Image: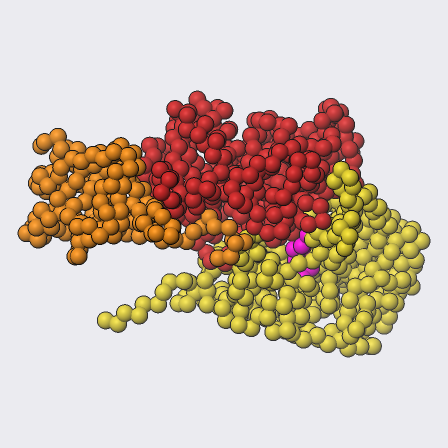
Chain colours: A orange, B red, C yellow
Amino acid sequence: MSALEQDLGALPFFAGLEPVYLRLIAECASPACYDPGESIFQQGGQADRFYIVGEGRVALEIFSSDRGILTIQTLASREVVGASWLFPPYIWQYDARALEFTRLLAFNAVCLRAACDQDHDLGYDLMKRFARLMVERLNAARFQLLDVYANPASGR
Amino acid sequence: MPTRLREGDGAPVPGFGISSIPSRQPGEHNGLLFSAFLCASASLRESKKGKISARTGIFVLFGFGVPGHNDRASGGAEVHVGILNAMIPIHYVVQRVCRETRDTFTIELAPSTEESIAAFEPGQFNMLYSFGIGEVPVSISGDPAESGCLVHTIRAVGPVTQALCDVTRGDTLGVRGPFGTAWPVSGAVGGDALIVAGGLGLAPLRPALYGLMRNRSAYGRIALIYGARSPEDLLYRREIEKWRSHLDLQIEVTVDGGRGEWRGHVGVVTTLIGRLVFDPARTTALVCGPEVMMRFTVLELLKQGLSEDRVFLSLERNMKCGMGLCGHCQLGPFLVCRDGPILTYSALRRWMDRREA
Amino acid sequence: MKCIARWGDLRRLFALLQSTGHTLYGPKVADSAVVIGEIASPDDLAVGWSDSQNPGSYRLHKDPHGPAFVFHSGADSWKRLLLPPQSTLWEADRTASGFEVLPSGGDSRPTAFIGMHGCDVTAMLRLDHVFGFQDDRHPSPGSPRATSRVTCIDPCYASIRRRSFVVGIQCTGPGGNCFCSSVGAGPHIEAGCDLVLTELPDEPDPFFHIKALTSAGQRALADLSLREAGPEHDEKAKNAVDQCAAAMPRSLDVSGIRELLHRNWDHSRWQATAHRCLTCGNCTMVCPTCFCTNILDETDLAGRRARRLREWDSCFSLEFSYIHGGGNVRSSAKARYRHWMAHKLAAWIDQFGELGCVGCGRCITWCPAGIDITEEAAVIREMDGAAGSSSEEKCHVRS
């Protein structure tokens, strides 16, 4: 097992993944690093990869001309960035920007999508992991939407 | 822990007798250990010069004594003995007003006469009175060790709180208290302590953090997660930076929504719980914020393996008297001003799950 | 000490109390109901007046050939005197340095409460525990506040209690909505009173058995030089009250009532009753143990004088549970009715170690919808755990 496979296996996201799949995923992975403020991907671009943060912090943002840059969420080490690679049209919904010096592992989505189509067990396992992640993100997003800290006197 | 009983210079008060009891640790259940009698119309206040002033009033004697029973009103939180005059406010003068955010102010008060409230425990609250306008419960957010100064962080959500936020140095306010149960600062000794604060919830938790840091070596890891609406709504910004400089304190601050300049976390507090390092079996969690935030947070804490009777919440209910006499603050068997506001999740769980309880 | 007395002796008792400066209060007839007011002689009491009480119904009628005291729970309770509907806690004036609380007087006149029934005496003992009053005039005080975590002592309440001389009357016949015996609140009176009267039956003129429970009561009997009661009087009195206890028209099974209500928190019955409940709060007003109050701060127009008032409040009001800057915790009628009943029969046990209900039946009589707390408890007990009794969803899936 290579060092990269070991690192991947230690990530909570891939916990319990079969070693043969770990190897496959590791083959699709390549390291990347970004300087503070550097763009990682932009809304509208091709979602042909997803990332897991090694160290640093990534902001998911939306830009609007009247309100400027709005940060949806920040993600830090061991967290997954990017779900638009899963389903067509494979287009990024948000901008992603490094807020500090950030090291990431980038995973080739085209490669992985093909591997999942070929091996459904791998596909099922990966889908389960992403589905769980999406449920957690959805719950967090709904909590965020509730705006619980708003001043009640200012009119809900 | 010393008792809060003060009798001026120690001379016994005629017709008045009380035996003191030590503070209790969460989980201890005993029958009531004290008795108190009172002469018809005298009240006692803590007095700096050792003189005792007599005035009609209502006495409150807090005790801790509940027979062991799974569903008893005891939330297992710490309760301390104190005597205080209850319905007549004590005069305090505003020393300092500090604007925290657009609608939240921190005011520092000092007693204007010899009378002052008894020493408070982290998590307790006072009833603050603005002459002619009204009275509201506000958690005490200062350092319990700083006895000369009473600190409150207030958010303007109505006419009384607006009046309290509009004060300037030299104004007089009325104070009744301290009321309620306390955070388990001593109960958390020997393990890890995790504080999760949402919005204004950091205010009643700050005294607990002071208590933990004052006795740092008695605890394992201490961590604070603080979530606010936006970077502009963060409280105690300078102090948070100071806390960050402590190497032995984990701090994570997050906001629900950020603009481009904010380089910290964006996302709800629950997303940060899994990032901290702590031993769930030995961790005591202190949680305070809007009810929805506490609900989500508790779910996440339990998912991480914390025990229900070591998760402490601070509840908010309609409070008028602050002493368990008017009935407004009831939640099931609890009178929140008296059995709370701090209660364990294990005591609260059934009642938090019930709608309109 | 036990004595027997005639009507004339009662008049002398009243005179004795008046001569020692007592203001007397007792049940009298006003506005077609028995209400508690100031009285001067036993003739002012609702003598010879009987009542027919049913859910949502109260009728007084004169019974000239019956015993003297045949009225039951009236339109108000002794709570009117023990916890006044409105009282000023303090007044303050604005000053240059802030405000100054004005020194207050205090009422110190002795009072006598004449004609408290067993249920009302028990209610008074319940309120003693709520307000932290420990009555040392009685040889064995009621259940201590061992299960309460806070002893809050209200000196206003204590003052009223300490200067009151209480004369109880044991009922010899129950009212239409009474159930004091099933909740252990009457009709026998063993504590809380200085004197206890029992009208002996089958006498051509009013004839009373009186027992003293305190030294003040004993002194009064001694001062009146009454004839001592013989064993036949004791037995007659006891039988009369026992008979009353056995003839209660309603009952509330309190065994495990706390757990019963907790188990059936989402019972469909609550919603059914809520449809009938007008949330008018009558029940809380007439209930002798309901103690919820509101604290109000008022100021005059010039903003120079402020005062703090305490007045009766009701958990049925929408704003009762209003959270500052939020909303009402209990906005539905169902939530408010359930809260009231569960406080009386369950939470009260958690808070004070005893039941909050004394079976006086006033809430049944004065409810415009005729809701009967004994019926509610019985229905829930009968349907305990049955379908519709919990919040579990019905399964709509057909196989």
x, y percent for residue C63: 80, 77
Chain part drawn in magenta: C287-295
x, y percent for residue B18: 69, 32
**B195 sits left or right of C192 in the view:** left
Seen at 53% across and 72% down, the residue is C275
Q: Quadrant of residue A80?
A: top left
Q: Eyeballing the image, is B151 above or below B351? A: above
In the rendered image, the residue lying farthest to the top is B217
Q: In the rendered structure, does residue C290 fall within the stretch colored magenta?
A: yes
Residue B211 visible in the snapshot: yes
Seen at 41% across and 25% down, the residue is B245
**C59 sits left or right of C386 in the view:** right
In the rendered image, the residue lying farthest to the front is A65
Instruction: Identify which residue, C35 or A71, lies in the foreground.
Output: A71
Instruction: Identify which residue, C98 or C37, lies in the foreground.
Output: C98
**C102 sits left or right of C250 in the view:** right
x, y percent for residue B307: 39, 40
Q: Eyeballing the image, is C323 above or below C279? A: above
